[in-house]
Amino acid sequence: MNCLNFLDFIKSEFGQLGQEEGFRYKYFDDEIKGIVVCWMVSKKVLNFTVKNKFNLLIAHEDLYFPPEYAGGDKTGVVSDFRKELLERNRINFLRLHYTIDKNFIFDVFDKLSGGKVLIKENFYRVYEFENNKLEDLAKELKKKYKVEFMRITESNKRVKRAGCLVGGLGLSINSKFIDKILTYNVDTVIAGEVDEYTIRALSDLKIGIIELGHEISERPGLIKFTEYLKKKLPEIPVKYL
Ligand SMILES: [Fe+2]
Ligand SMILES: [Fe+2]
């Protein structure tokens, strides 16, 4: 299977890709020797890929910095460093963002939240809790996500309706999404990553925040996607990093 066959396989399973998705690099006719799935490229990911002679890198987030959403044009100090490494080792890069969010990340996040899913309209999700103290809910989530630290606000607040801001949805660049989730009368949000714009905005309304971490919140869904690939493509080595 080469990279273009792989992309056809993904489209046949999940439908058309979003605009921000698809191949960003470069030798699409090469046979796939191994696939690494990651949240975002890093030195660790690149080193593993090179060392094991894998040649398809699938990341949930952008290859480039500055990223496309910030108007990046695929150049820059970091972009050039990453491209040079891919080039030198003939590694292909595929971004799968919307597709993995839609088919894996949100559903896994719903389950791990521990709440009952009250509202599920596209990416708008609201979970019902039985009056849990926010701090206690955060402690439960810390255990489930196996992390030592989390950022919270309104620690004594009682949680009954929590909105889902998995991944980067809690960033002010997504404030239209955040504004809409507030119309569902949530008292708390469970987020991947929030910035200070969001913290200030929600604190004015005394809405509590549990911030897990961007990667941490998306990782379980990405692992599920990796397991899915392993099952579907048993002839190709697939590894999550
Ligand atoms: Fe995501
Ligand atoms: Fe994300």
Image: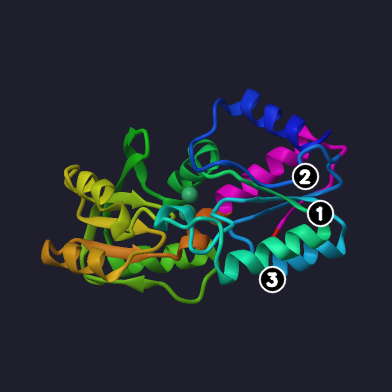
Q: Which residues are magenta?
A: 220-240
Type of amino acid at the residue the image marks with label 3: Lys
Cβ atoms at labels 1 and 3 below 8 Å apart: no
218 w.r.t. 4: above or below: below
Q: x, y (%) of residue 161? A: 24, 49
Give yes or no for residue 237 being in the magenta stretch. yes
Q: Quadrant of residue 141?
A: bottom left
- Left/right of residue 21 with respect to residue 71 in the rendered view: right
- In the visual, does 89 lie left or right of 205? right
Task: Report the quarter where the N terminus lies.
Answer: top right
Q: CA distance from mark 1 to mark 2?
A: 7 Å
Numbered mark located on residue 27 in the image: 2
Residue designated by label 1: 90
- At a point 37% along the width and 48% down the height, the residue shown is 115
- State the image quarter where residue 5 is shown: top right
Residue 23 position, x and y percent, is 64, 42
Q: Residues within 10 Å of mark 3 (few under 14, many from 20)?
A: few
- The residue type indicated by label 2 comes to Tyr
Name the residue tied to disc 3. 43
Name which residue type carries label 1.
Answer: Arg
